[in-house]
Image (spheres, coloured by chain):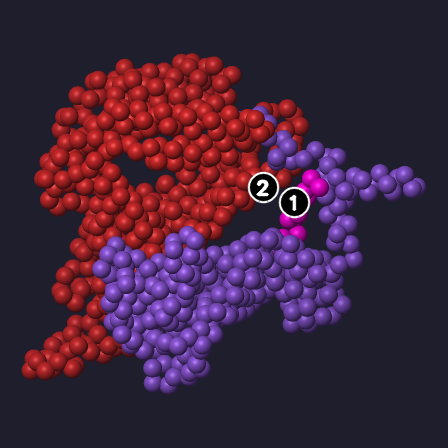
Amino acid sequence: MRRLGTMLIVLFGSTFIVFNLGANMGDPLEALRISQDPKAHQLILVMTRELHLDVPSPIRYFYWLRGVLAGFVGQLDLGRTRDGLDVIAQLGDAIPTSIRLVALATLLAIVLGISIGIVTALRQYSRFDYAVTFYAFLCFSLPVFWFAVLLKQFLAIGFNNFLANPEVTTPWVIGLSLISGVFWAAVIGGSRARVWSIFGISAGSTAGIIILMGAVQWFTNPGLGIALVGLFSIGAAVAITQLSTGLSNRRTLYSALSVAGLGIVLYYPLQWVADQKHHFQNGLLVAALFAAFAVAISFVFNKIDRGPAVRTSVITAVIVLLLLFVDKLMQTWPGYMATDAVNYRPVPTVGQVNDLLEPGNFWNSTLDTLMHLVLPTIALAIISFAGYVRYARGSLLEVLNQDYIRTARAKGLTERTVIMRHAFRNTLIPLTTIMVSDIVGIIGGAVITESIFGWIGMGSLFRGALNSLDLNMLMGISLVTASLAMIANLLADLLYSALDPRIRAGK
Amino acid sequence: MFKKKNQSVEPTTATTEGENAIANKEIEGLSQGQIVRRRFVRHRAAMIALFSLIGISLFVFTASGLHLGSEKHPITVAGWWHYSITDLPELAMDGCPDGTVGCPTLDLLPPFIDGTGMQIGDHPFGQDDIGRDYFALVMRGAQQSIMVMVIIGLIGGLIGTVVGAISGFFRGWVDAILMRFTDFIITIPFIMVGAVVGFKYGNLGVVVLALMLGLFSWTGLARLVRGEFLTLRTREFVDAARVAGASNARIVFKHILPNAVGVIIVSVTLLMSGAILTESALSYLGFGVVAPDVSLGLLISQYQDSFTTRPWLFWYPGLFIISIALCVNFIGDGLRDAFDPRQKRRITKKEREQARVAKRESKATA
């Protein structure tokens, strides 16, 4: 409750600052003052009265605040834009767009950044570490608008050209296999002979997979099919069990594998479900089914210490569901590519949805939304990704120097338990604080990204408001961003106490 | 994958002691400042970055000279490059590939690779749409970026340190008020504050813009400095100074500030590299430096559509932004390593071997 009070005070303060800045930015009537229109004088008087321009800005702020406070009795009023449109309605359209952009980018950056950061910390001072460090600094120094133009040019147009005529050429095969070989060799590491063998295996298998994919026309007609979905699900079950409890914990392994099995068994029934109406409800039902099954099966297999088993099975269930979802999207791909609106250029460079795409087909429009998200998300994520890599690395190194890690090692725990149970969780604690400032940063970054990729979200509204000196619109946007930042702050605090028992005890 | 991690993460105790001995021997009898300087000079990436940055700055500032002040009151010192940003030489119409105009004349490849000789030519970076020399434009833009970076760094650093120091040292209601105020500003995305400020002050020249941006960029630093002061003021040496009758000013400037200077310097460098990106982003959006003056962000936004036909108009400004920001980031990283007392220098195999030999020899002589 006290925290809520502080939040409101901060919200009040930051909107007050923005209001005064915005109000003194320029004269909103300038265009009218110099215009020759005989009605200009009339209009000036009207606008002055409506926008209270005759009142000094610190006092005018309270007129605006009155509208916001009315929100508590259900009559939120953020005023009107200069064109007479309702600010709330405009924001209502823009907020989901921006959140879609920001949320996916943040999620991607956090997951990838933390995992790569942890690998670099475990391989401190290796070549991989140096390479990632350099790459992270490069990302820090990258202007997002510059990078976005490169993305548009090379990724979108290049990839579209490739997909128009998917032929796997030898240089690409060699290049990609070399990259994958170097990557895996650097990540896994070890003695020289081992590094070379890992390099050989991963480069060879990459080359093989790419050639095979080209041979079976996978790029024009992608899909996983029941065999690959099953294979990947089982692989995911094994990998997650290895990370969370170790393969020696047979009971957990069995429950994770059963979840993967459920995915395989339900593959064909789910194909049928996916073509029915009410996709959203059906999706929720299927997800609930999987979750319930995951929890139940781990209770069946495990008599004691059920927590880790439940966690493992639920994570496996999420991955299996994702695989099924991706598979369904891939099946939609050829049809989507062939539609007139797409016409075999699937990676768009501007816009948030393809207006020409005929509505009604759920899978097509989902695919469409996702394809439009690709470039902006990469542009946004790549920069905060670098931050997470650095912080995760620093944080894990700090933790690994602690006494309790030494104790854990000394009492003979496996390296996996030490890293995943003792070190990893504590690494996340300082990272939660960074997430908050990062989310504020990403919202700011979205202003630029949206304008490059032609999205109509908060960023473009902000730009428009600034150019037309539209104070009400500006205030609406800053109210929303400030509230988002506050909510992120609150979430981080909650996460903090969930991760760090000391904070809970201190309360 | 999780089996053989021991040697990479934590050396065994015996070698740790040996390494400590090597590391300690090096810093015997040196002051804190000397140790930091030594560590920084050893940081290879940071040193390369430092010299490149000095090189870039000298090159950029001497090339087009200094142009300060606003449009009405210019302060000008000429540079060695024979075009300025206002010159309009004739647009080179031929000699370019694919029928484009105004392509770069810079050719760094020696004759045995591409057959033509190395040359700089009249327009090394090419020309823009109306024939202005692109080298002069990029130089001017890079100059602006460096100036913005330094001014924001100084102002943000100064205000941040003062605010953080005051609230960390005095605590109580002063702290509460100052920190709430910091929160007010921190919740507004910097690019938004920047845009509002830039919209009003962008046309007054880059110095005014940087000054105004600096007034809003101190918040992160203030929080860090406050945290540092809060921990330092409870330390024994501060108590000792107070018992000895030192005034508040003396305690702050003689005892606490020198210990907090590492945090301050490191975050100021990070602030600076962020400042370059912010300025160019603002100019890109049209809320920063405005025409007829140029900035790297403005150049990119003007010519991003020419990328397919005349890519050099896009590459050069971007490369300058990246190289300046990259240098500053690496310097910051080197400084952080240098100031961090827990940071152990990586002991190479060779040094370990040498230490072992030296130890054996000393035993033999004894």
Q: Are marks 2 and 1 in contact (CB under 8 Å)?
A: yes
Question: Would you say residue A147 sits in the magenta stretch?
Answer: no
Looking at the picture, tell me which residue is in the foreground, A442 or B18: B18
Q: Would residue A471 be found to the left or right of residue B243 on screen?
A: left
Q: Check disc 2: other Cα within 10 Å, few if <14, some if 14-19, many if 20+.
A: some
Above or below: residue A400 compared with residue B230: above
Instruction: Tell me if mark 1 has few (under 14), some (14-19) or many (20+) residues whose alpha carbon lies within 10 angstroms of its own.
Output: few
x then y, percent, for residue B203: 32, 76
Task: Write down the residue under mark 1.
Answer: B346
Quick check: A326 above or below A257? below
Visual hue assigned to chain A? red
Q: Residue furthest right?
A: B366
- Secondary structure beneath dot 2 equals loop
Q: Residue at x 20, y 50 (%)?
A: A351
Residue B40 in sight:
yes
Furthest toward the left, the residue is: A38
Residue holding disc 2: A125
Q: Residue at x 69, y 62 (%)?
A: B33
